[in-house]
Image (cartoon, rainbow, N blue to C red):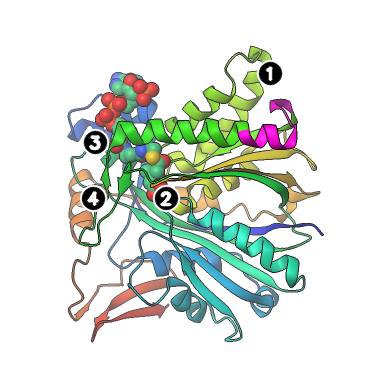
Amino acid sequence: MKIGIDKIGFFTPHLYVDMAKLAQARNEDPNKYLIGIGQNKMAVIPPTQDAVTLAANAAAKVLTVEDKEAIDLVIVATESGVDNSKSTAAYVSELLGLSHEIRTIELKQACYAATAGLQLAKGHIALAPDKKALVIGSDIARYGLKTPGEPTQGGGAVAMLVSKDPKLVTLEAESAYYAKDVMDFWRPLSQTEAKVDGKFSANIYLEFFEKVYQDYLAKTGLKLTDFSALLFHLPYTKQGLKGLRKALEGVDPTVASHYYNEFEASRKYNMATGNLYTGSLYLSLLSLLENTDTLKAGDRLGLFSYGSGAQGEFFSGRLQPNYKEALTYQTSEMLEMRAEVSVAEYEQIFSAILTDDHDRKLDISKDPAQFVLAGIKDFKRQYLKK
Ligand code: HMG
């Protein structure tokens, strides 16, 4: 049975900061952020959006009434969870109006967790082929103002509907994974910003890529040219480019140029958004599908998922007939409709994050999203569908 990704929905809030202007404000050469980091805009997340609302807004973009009736498993992967006990998925399922005869769960392993969700959903559909599973990666990437990690912040959510006979990509059976306890990036329970050993994390990411990519090739007997494109977790797009360069070492330049071209298509949306943590790899997949001119049905995509701490996985998928017709092409418009904020406004919004659970009402009038966080009352988050 073919199982895989039937639909992908993406949401990021309506605000962004320009990376060249941020670089100027930080006394850096703009090209360090634009080329060295590989980001041109960074999503700015208002206090009225959190992991729950981002996830609900992403899923609402693609789910039909029929999809909602068929979903009996909701997995939300996040490292920006809003409660130590109740899962983000419980809130999201209710906001979306899903059935109550359903399993809801939140998964965590840094940026890797949505891949774990996808693999679990695949197993679920193998046992229940007439059902559908909703897998969402939803996060807000925060390192702190004026830190080296600052230009790699961002946020948003990617929702994937997993089913049999999917319209976009089938997931192949083989996969290679590797885990090791590494302190490259983490966020202690008391902190709203991540701790990171930046250069170390970038090197560990590449080590894990080489390990799982080579393991995958050894297991399957496949070679580079059996893939039509390679996709990467993109904490910032230069990091994925470094991974791709590793895979292309010693490869004929005319062959390599094809992979570099597909990579450009796959990083377009990520460059304009920043790190989505769990959603980054899947935003890159959406970016590739909507922006490539050359990929066709049956083409194999290789995907590298990485989560600090650390977990890596390399797996593959095949493009389905008419996959282009199954895409909604809403992303470019959503990204272009966003409003730019100045660096000073971004700093103010960044610092307005909720750091306690006291009663409050938030001003939701300026947030055009369908699902918003309206405040907190008696330690309960107050979500609204507008
Ligand atoms: P930095 O140390 O300020 O930057 O922060 P740098 O000095 O290394 O410069 C960055 C690049 O810009 C370099 O290129 C420079 O040469 C280049 P590279 O050597 O890397 O190829 N550069 C220029 N290029 C063009 N024109 C110029 C110019 N100036 C400099 N004028 C760092 C960089 C990544 C360390 C920092 O942003 C950081 O700590 N980021 C957060 C950590 C991170 O994203 N790590 C990635 C791997 S870990 C991961 O992916 C997991 C994660 O998503 C979390 C999770 O799993 O949940 C993070």
Q: Is residue 329 above or below residue 152?
A: below
Q: Amino acid at mark 2?
A: Tyr
Cβ of mark 3 under 8 A from ligand 1: yes
Between the residue at mark 3 and the residue at mark 2, the CA separation in whole angstroms equals 17 Å
Between the residue at mark 1 and the residue at mark 4, the CA separation in whole angstroms equals 42 Å
Left or right of 143 in this view: 79: right
> Element under label 3?
loop
Q: Nearer the viewer, residue 334 or 166?
A: 166
Look at 17% across and 28% down and name the residue there: 27
Numbered tag placed on residue 148 in the rendering: 3
Front: mark 2 or 4: 2
Q: Amino acid at mark 1?
A: Val
> Element under label 1?
helix
Q: Circle 1 is placed at which residue position? A: 255
The answer to whether the residues at label 3 and label 4 have Cβ atoms under 8 Å apart is no
Between the residue at mark 3 and the residue at mark 4, the CA separation in whole angstroms equals 17 Å
> Element under label 4?
helix
Numbered tag placed on residue 320 in the rendering: none
Between the residue at mark 1 and the residue at mark 3, the CA separation in whole angstroms equals 35 Å
Q: Which of pointers 3 and 4 lies earlier in the amino acid sequence?
A: 3
Q: Which of pointers 1 and 3 lies earlier in the amino acid sequence?
A: 3
Q: Circle 2 is placed at which residue position? A: 277
User: From which residue to which does the magenta span run?
Assistant: 215-225
Q: Circle 4 is placed at which residue position? A: 346
Q: Which of pointers 1 and 2 lies earlier in the amino acid sequence?
A: 1
